[in-house]
């Protein structure tokens, strides 16, 4: 247990390893994690209680913290050593419950760097329980923490009023803590600059631009120099020879291999079905999550959330809602799942709907940029300016018409730290593993479904019905309706299918924008349903349809 952003999750990860289970606490949307750790020759269950500043139980997080506290047999109270006074309030509240407790005095390295000197022995005497200095990101002090756990005993503590607690906190801090004056370092100046709007916005744009420049260019290099040769020179000939040995022609041959030699357009389950997720998307996903983990562990993401807080309030959200949007730029599925961090149903609905409509995934962004840059950067700018306008307009409208509360969230902004490569690797691997197990099966199923519509001739009937409608409404070729159908399976493939249709630059820009706005891919749509339920999913779907039709008609009027 502990305040938000004191390094609880880092300590929890050190004690339990990677394999943990995270879920919503029964009857709430508050997420907690639990795992197992070796303890006294056996295993103990460890629960990572949501961060809270007190046990007053005025909001859901505090209620959940109270409930989970009753279940626990031993408390590991994680304290931020750089902010002792604020953290001790919860500590004194926990002591009043008379349960065995040990303190992990975390961020001990940051305290030393900032000139915060804490007498650990004196602090132990004041509190009557073991106090172990720790550094969660490096593992410093974790062994000592585990060894001290069995020695902890309940402490009898008289219940105090709020005023009495603060008096005792003042006495403890003045006795155990000494501060020495240190000059403002370059790192601290950068921390301040990244939160102030005048300097923070240019820094944010630069960080995001550099991140995506690196991801896109490194991803393209890996695909062209490493993965494509494997698929085209080795895997392709092997799988075609193997399949043709058993199925030289016919329906099964077309389902497994599709038509043609191109891995993207053949639409075979064993060609396109594997090439798209593993060759076209996975390199970008790995790079994106690596960069995201570095930004998280360095302390930049909380600053970006704080910087965006004012703008996000205009659309019924708060700054932390920028995190699902950034995650969605990698893959909409984890972005959709991360809307759980938002407090109210209203906020989750707005964030999920905006994500589905206005945030293209990384693979889709790469292909949109690659297609349109050939004609000039202004065409790329039209697509993203439209999406940004939609994000703000739809968000502002929904915040006014959707009933419900938009509670304020107090965010803690940690100092900049050097990311741990081991921690970055673990987090990236967990996210990539989730993508492979959750998203890839949907892609295979989607390719199979589209392939069956080809083989059965159903696709021709769909094109004949909806092609003329699309041509009249949006001024696009009737063949573009196929891309919209495939877009429900895989948006990046759908955008790629626009290239050979011989459209003008403006038509291609319009088609890319409509594909970005209308229904998300089926994997994201399933998660949307899982998170929002049937009624809210139908509402969100209606908003998507209205938005895509409106944007298509308006852009046709303006551009064509």
Image (cartoon, helix red, strand yellow):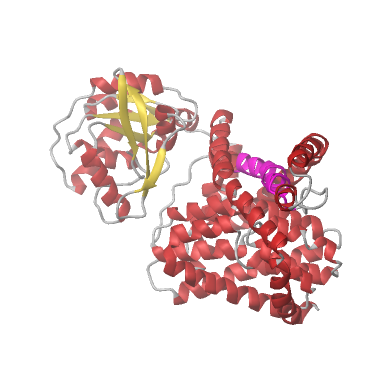
The reply, left or right, for residue 53 in relation to residue 220 is left
The image position of residue 8, as x and y in percent, is 40, 37
How would you classify the magenta stretch by its main secondary structure?
helix
- Any magenta on residue 278? yes
Tell which of 227 and 300 is nearer to you: 227
Side (left or right) of 476 relative to 33: right
Q: Is residue 44 above or below residue 545?
A: above
Q: Quadrant of residue 243?
A: top right
The picture quadrant where one finds residue 185 is top right
In percent of width and height, residue 224 lies at 81, 41
* Quadrant in which the C terminus is drawn: bottom right
In this figure, what is the number of numbered marks? 0
- Depth check: 126 or 315 in front? 315
In this rendered view, identify the residue nearer to me: 210 or 286: 286
The image quarter containing residue 174 is top left
Instruction: State yes or no: residue 134 in magenta.
Output: no
Q: The N terminus appears in which quarter of the rendering? A: top left
Q: At 42% across and 66% down in the image, what residue appears?
A: 346
Residue appearing at x 39%, y 19% in the figure: 143
Query: Which residue: 21% across, 48% down?
Result: 162
Point 18% across, 38% down: residue: 97
Q: Which residues fall within the magenta stretch?
A: 267-292
**Image location of residue 244, percent across then percent down:** 78, 41
Is residue 72 visible to the viewer in this orientation of the structure?
Answer: yes
Picture coordinates of residue 391, whole percent (x, y): 59, 67
The answer, for residue 196, to whether it is visible in the render is no
475 over 209 or under it: above or below: below
Q: Is residue 295 left or right of residue 495?
A: left
């Amino acid at each position: 247990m502990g305040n938000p952003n004191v390094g609880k999750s880092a300590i929890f990860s050190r004690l339990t390893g990677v394999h943990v289970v995270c879920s919503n606490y029964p009857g709430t949307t508050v997420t907690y994690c639990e795992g197992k750790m070796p303890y006294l020759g056996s295993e103990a269950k460890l629960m990572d209680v949501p961060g809270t500043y007190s046990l007053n139980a005025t909001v859901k997080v505090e209620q959940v913290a109270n409930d989970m506290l009753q279940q626990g047999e031993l408390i590991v109270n994680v304290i931020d050593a750089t902010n002792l006074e604020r953290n001790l309030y919860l500590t004194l509240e926990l002591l009043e419950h008379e349960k065995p407790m040990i303190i992990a005095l975390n961020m001990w390295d940051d305290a030393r760097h900032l000139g915060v000197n804490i007498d650990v022995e004196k602090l132990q005497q004041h509190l009557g329980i073991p106090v172990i200095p720790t550094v969660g990101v490096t593992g410093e002090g974790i062994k000592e923490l585990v060894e001290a756990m069995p020695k902890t005993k309940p402490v009898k503590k008289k219940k105090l009023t709020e005023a009495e607690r603060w008096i005792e906190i003042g006495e403890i801090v003045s006795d155990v803590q000494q501060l020495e004056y240190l000059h403002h370092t370059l790192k601290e100046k950068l921390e301040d600059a990244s939160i102030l709007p005048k300097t923070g916005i240019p820094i944010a744009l630069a960080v995001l631009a550099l991140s995506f420049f690196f991801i896109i260019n490194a991803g393209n290099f890996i695909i062209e120099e490493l993965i494509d040769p494997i698929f085209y020179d080795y895997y392709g000939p092997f799988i075609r020879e193997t399949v043709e040995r058993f199925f030289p022609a016919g329906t099964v041959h077309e389902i497994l291999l599709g038509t043609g030699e191109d891995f993207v357009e053949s639409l075979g389950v064993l060609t396109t079905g594997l090439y798209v997720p593993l060759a076209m998307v996975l390199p970008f996903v790995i790079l994106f999550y690596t960069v995201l983990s570095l930004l998280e562990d360095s302390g930049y993401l909380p600053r970006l959330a704080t910087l965006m807080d004012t703008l996000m309030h205009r659309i019924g959200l708060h700054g932390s809602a920028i995190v699902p949007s950034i995650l969605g730029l990698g893959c909409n599925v984890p972005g959709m799942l991360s809307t759980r961090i938002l407090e109210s149903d209203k906020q989750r609905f707005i964030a999920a709907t905006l994500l589905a409509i206005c945030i293209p995934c990384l693979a889709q962004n790469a292909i949109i940029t690659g297609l349109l840059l050939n004609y000039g950067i202004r065409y790329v700018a039209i697509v993203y300016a439209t999406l940004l306008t939609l994000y703000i307009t739809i968000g502002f409208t929904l915040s006014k018409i959707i009933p419900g509360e938009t509670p304020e969230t107090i965010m803690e902004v940690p100092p900049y730290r050097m990311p741990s490569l081991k921690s970055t690797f673990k987090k990236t691997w967990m996210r990539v593993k989730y993508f492979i197990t959750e998203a890839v099966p949907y892609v295979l199923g989607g390719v199979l479904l589209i392939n069956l519509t080809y083989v059965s001739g159903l696709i021709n009937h769909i094109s004949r019905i909806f092609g003329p409608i699309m041509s009249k409404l949006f001024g696009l070729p009737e063949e573009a309706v196929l891309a919209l159908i495939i877009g429900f399976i895989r948006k990046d493939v759908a955008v790629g299918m626009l290239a050979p249709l011989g459209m003008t630059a403006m038509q291609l820009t319009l088609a890319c924008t409509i594909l970005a706005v209308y229904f998300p891919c089926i994997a994201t749509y399933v998660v949307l349903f899982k998170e929002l339920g049937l009624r809210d999913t139908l509402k969100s779907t209606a908003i998507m349809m209205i938005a895509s039709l409106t944007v298509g008609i308006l852009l046709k009027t303006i551009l064509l």
